[in-house]
């Protein structure tokens, strides 16, 4: 049974703030990772739309991080950069991962 949780932060910002967002994301992921964090991605879309996705082992891990002092880091980061953001939380109900080819 899969218990993973995917959190998406959807962002909108002017092009002149992109470098600041990328640098802030790099600083954030350079910190020790919270227990249960499986993956995170910074995605650039079109017309100033960005997304930060984080995949968590389970809802308990994600909620523990959000309740910790680290949990306010990303929302504070977006606020400090004057970035409009919304958050969505999804339960992963199924998944398929491309198998890695064997390298001879």
Image: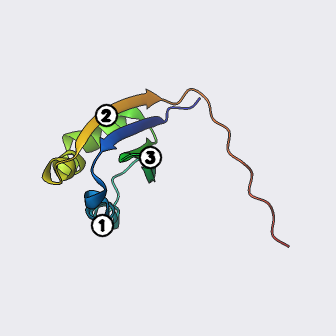
Is disc 1 placed on a helix, strand or loop?
Answer: helix
Q: Which residue corresponds to the image point at 34% horizontal and 65% vertical from the top-left?
A: 26
Task: Return the mark for residue 63.
Answer: none
**What residue is at 36 percent from the left and 51 percent from the top?**
35
Q: Nearer the viewer, residue 42 or 100?
A: 42
Q: Residue 89 placed where, x, y %? A: 38, 30
Give the Cα distance between marks 2 and 3.
19 Å
Q: Judging from the image, what secondary structure is the residue with disc 3 in?
A: loop
Q: At which x and y percent is residue 37? A: 41, 49
Q: Mark 2 or mark 3: which comes first in sequence?
A: 3
State whether residue 102 appears in this view.
yes
Q: Reading the chain from its start, which is encountered first: label 1 or label 3?
A: 1
Q: Which mark is residue 23?
A: 1
Residue 80 x, y percent position in the rendering? 13, 53
Q: CA distance from mark 1 to mark 3?
A: 19 Å
* Residue 25: quarter of image: bottom left
For mark 3, what is the residue? 46
- Image location (x, y in percent) of residue 50: 38, 47
Of residues 35 and 28, the one drawn nearer to the viewer in this rendering: 28
Tell me the element at label 2.
strand
> Which residue is at a point 35% across and 34% down the rendered structure image?
60
Q: In the drawing, does residue 22 fall left or right of residue 55? A: left
Identify which residue is drawn at 81% across, 70% down.
Answer: 103
Q: Is residue 51 left or right of residue 97?
A: left
| Labels 1 & 2 near each other (Cβ < 8 A) | no
> Which residue is the site of mark 2?
87
Question: Disc 2, disc 3: CB below 8 Å?
Answer: no
Q: Is residue 3 above or below residue 99?
A: above
Residue at the outermost left position:
80
């Amino acid at each position: 049974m899969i218990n993973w949780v995917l959190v998406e932060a959807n962002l909108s910002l002017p092009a002149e703030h992109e470098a600041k967002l990328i640098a802030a994301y790099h600083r954030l992921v350079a910190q020790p990772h919270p227990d249960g964090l499986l993956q995170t991605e910074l995605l650039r879309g079109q017309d100033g739309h960005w997304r930060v996705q984080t995949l968590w082992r389970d809802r308990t891990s994600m909620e523990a991080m959000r309740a910790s002092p680290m949990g306010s880091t990303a929302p504070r980061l977006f606020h400090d950069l004057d970035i409009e953001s919304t958050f969505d939380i999804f339960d992963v109900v199924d998944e398929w991962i491309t198998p890695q080819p064997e390298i001879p």
